[in-house]
Image: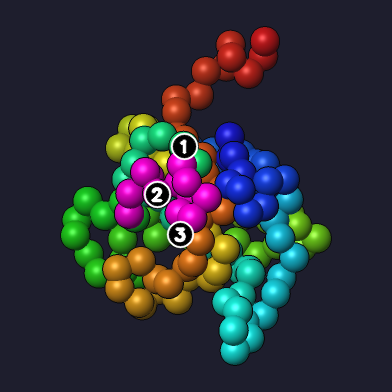
Amino acid sequence: MIIAGPDYPSITGLVTFADTPAGTMVCVDVKGLPEYRPATDDKSPAGPFGFHLHEGCLCEVGGPEKPFEGCGGHWNPTKQPHGNHAGDFPVLVSSNGRARMCFVTDRFTVDEIIGRTVIIHENPDDYRSQPAGNSGRRIACGSIRPWDSVQWLS
């Protein structure tokens, strides 16, 4: 489950991970994203939204100045430069506040990421700025847990 930070409290969503013969399928469905805002001289853009796997394990909002700071940096087990982190995902593009996307990656298996977090950032990832792509504020977070079918059926 995706939970919102203080900047955009209506964000909700779900990210799922599934091992497939081609790699790990990652699917995200998120609602309540802010309306697109292009960058200006004094304001950074809102959207498309950076989307990353982070090394931390809990989605605690923390202070309003730096939401979800306890999630740490991008998950990067092989110490690659930004753009090649195992946790670097495609940006989320929204339409009327909703973004849906699936992709397959060979950078990890589901078992390797249980206990980590996903973060949605306010700005797009440029895939080159070090160490994290200049994606801006963390606006939403999801903790990665094993799927429990009983939990979802009750």
Q: What kind of residue is marked 1?
A: Glu
Which mark identifies residue 89?
3
Residue 24 appears in view:
no
C-beta proximity under 8 Å, tags 1 and 3: no
Which mark identifies residue 60?
1
Classify 37 as above or below 28: below
Q: Secondary structure at mark 2?
A: helix
Quadrant of the image occupied by residue 114: top left
Crowd tier of the residue under label 1, counting other residues whose Cα lies within 10 Å: few below 14, some 14–19, many 20 or above: some
Which mark identifies residue 51?
none
What stretch of residues is rendered in magenta?
A: 62-73
**Mark 2 = which residue?**
69
Classify 149 as above or below 137: above
Crowd tier of the residue under label 3, counting other residues whose Cα lies within 10 Å: few below 14, some 14–19, many 20 or above: some
Q: What kind of residue is marked 3?
A: Phe
Which quarter of the figure is the N terminus placed in? Answer: top right
Residue positioned most to the right? 96
State which tag comes first along the sequence, 3 or 2.
Answer: 2
Q: Percent from the top left, x then y, of residue 139?
A: 56, 53
Q: For the residues marked 2 and 1, what is the alpha-carbon distance in whole angstroms?
A: 8 Å
